Image (cartoon, helix red, strand yellow):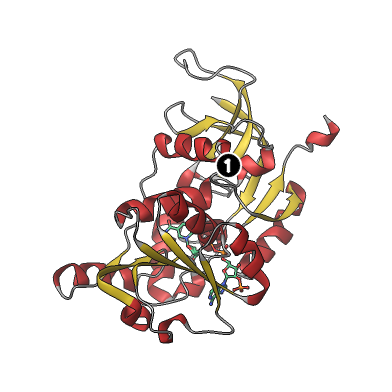
């Protein structure tokens, strides 16, 4: 199917791929270059999330028609920082949530899919206690909302400037990391979701209940720790890459958006032409939620 893209996003994955995970150390950088390109990214057009309208379909397509409003992710194939992309009917694509704008729909998948993947690995269940560290990022804002949806008791950790935003997402309590170190307040949790990759198992192990899990989103050391803790000790590190997302997940997120149970947080919106400025902002690692690129200005159509 050929999709005319109206909006896309700049994610941490776009920036990490372009710079070959330079900030994550030598090993991560080398591995990144082997996967994504030795001298420069093999895929010259980054961007994976998109929202737009179907422009043309192949003869075998049955679920979508020309003109349908769709959203989804091209995953590691990238190519969404563009006016058009081609995508299979069976890929990560669904009809847009009713009443969502292209900008909102474009920002659903990055945090939403990754959080679903992580919570599934941890088998998150109703009644469990979850601490979301870095609750203000793309994954963190999804992490708070989806944990509430799954019936968990949610403690969110973020900086002073994001406390109100994170409270509004439904966290049961919010800890401002500038005021309090959650590892020293005596509380323990079933799951600690390090949604921004800035904490570590060794530092927060004492805040996990027996049998609890430290859910990581980043960091090669966490792959080793996943293996190690699966054999030794009663507290686990859970980190698996690459994540496996399904079209069912995209449809599930669409339904949550329609039911008002999940809303992507949008920090800034740039026109596609300002993709460099947008990427520079994402690289500060300080965005709140998502950064959107407008490809078609729908106010003008
Ligand atoms: N495994 C995967 O497949 C996958 C996929 C996508 C992303 N990731 C990784 O997941 C991580 C999160 O991505 P993201 O896009 O959600 O991040 P993000 O949106 O860039 O996170 C930025 C947010 O984190 C907060 N933050 C920054 N430093 C912090 C710290 N030391 N402690 C607590 N909060 C901090 C910032 O607010 P303040 O500075 O005000 O606190 C900001 O709101 C990244 O490392 C990314 O590479 C992994």
Quadrant position of residue 223:
bottom left
Q: Residue at x 70, y 48 (%)?
A: 293
Q: Report whether the residue tagged 1 is closer than 8 Å to ligand 1.
A: no
Image coords of residue 2 (percent x, y):
58, 26
Image coords of residue 206 (percent x, y):
32, 82
Which residue is situated farthest in the left direction here?
231
Query: Which residue in the protein does label 1 denote?
Result: 260
Position of 101 with respect to 255 (left or right) is right
Quadrant position of residue 222:
bottom left
Q: Residue at x 57, y 49 (%)?
A: 44
Q: Nearer the viewer, residue 210 or 1?
A: 210
Position of 199 with respect to 177 (left or right) is left
Report whether residue 231 is seen.
yes
Position of 183 with respect to 45 (left or right) is left
Describe the element under mark 1 as helix, strand or loop.
loop
Callout 1 crowding tier (Cα within 10 Å): few <14, some 14–19, many ≥20: few
Which residue is situated farthest in the bottom direction here?
184
Q: Residue at x 14, y 70 (%)?
A: 231
Image coords of residue 48 (percent x, y):
54, 46
The image shows residue 242, relative to residue 238, as above or below, that is above
**Quick one: quadrant of the C terminus?**
top right
Number of numbered discs: 1
The image shows residue 205, relative to residue 262, as above or below, that is below
Q: Nearer the viewer, residue 239 or 181?
A: 181
Q: Residue at x 67, y 32 (%)?
A: 99
Report whether residue 79 is seen.
no
Image coords of residue 8 (percent x, y):
64, 44
Which residue is situated farthest in the top direction here?
59
């Amino acid at each position: 199917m050929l999709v005319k893209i109206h909006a896309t996003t700049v994610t941490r994955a776009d920036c990490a791929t372009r710079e070959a995970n330079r900030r994550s150390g030598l090993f991560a950088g080398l591995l990144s270059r082997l996967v994504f390109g030795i001298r420069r990214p093999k895929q010259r057009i980054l961007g994976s999330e998109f929202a737009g309208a179907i422009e043309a379909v192949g003869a075998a397509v049955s679920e979508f028609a020309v003109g349908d409003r769709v959203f989804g992710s091209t995953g590691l194939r990238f190519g969404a920082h563009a006016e058009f992309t081609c995508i299979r009917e069976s890929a990560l694509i669904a009809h847009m949530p009713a009443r969502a704008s292209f900008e909102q729909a474009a920002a659903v998948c990055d945090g939403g899919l990754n959080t679903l993947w992580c919570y599934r690995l941890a088998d998150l269940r109703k009644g469990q206690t979850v601490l979301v560290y870095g609750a203000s990022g793309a994954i963190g804002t999804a992490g708070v909302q989806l944990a509430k949806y799954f019936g968990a008791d949610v403690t969110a950790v973020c900086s002073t400037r994001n406390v109100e935003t994170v409270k509004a997402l439904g966290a049961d309590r919010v800890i401002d990391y500038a005021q309090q170190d959650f590892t020293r307040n005596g509380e323990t949790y079933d799951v600690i979701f390090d949604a921004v990759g800035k904490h570590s198992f060794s530092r927060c192990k004492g805040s996990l209940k027996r049998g609890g899990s430290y859910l990581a989103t980043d960091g090669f050391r966490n792959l080793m720790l996943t293996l190690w803790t699966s054999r030794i000790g009663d507290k686990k590190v859970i980190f698996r890459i690459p994540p496996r997302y399904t079209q069912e997940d995209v449809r599930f997120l669409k339904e949550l958006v329609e039911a008002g149970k999940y809303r992507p947080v949008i920090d800034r919106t740039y026109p596609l032409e300002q993709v460099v400025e947008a990427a520079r902002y994402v690289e500060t690692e300080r965005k709140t939620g998502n950064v959107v690129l407008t490809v078609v200005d729908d106010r003008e159509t």
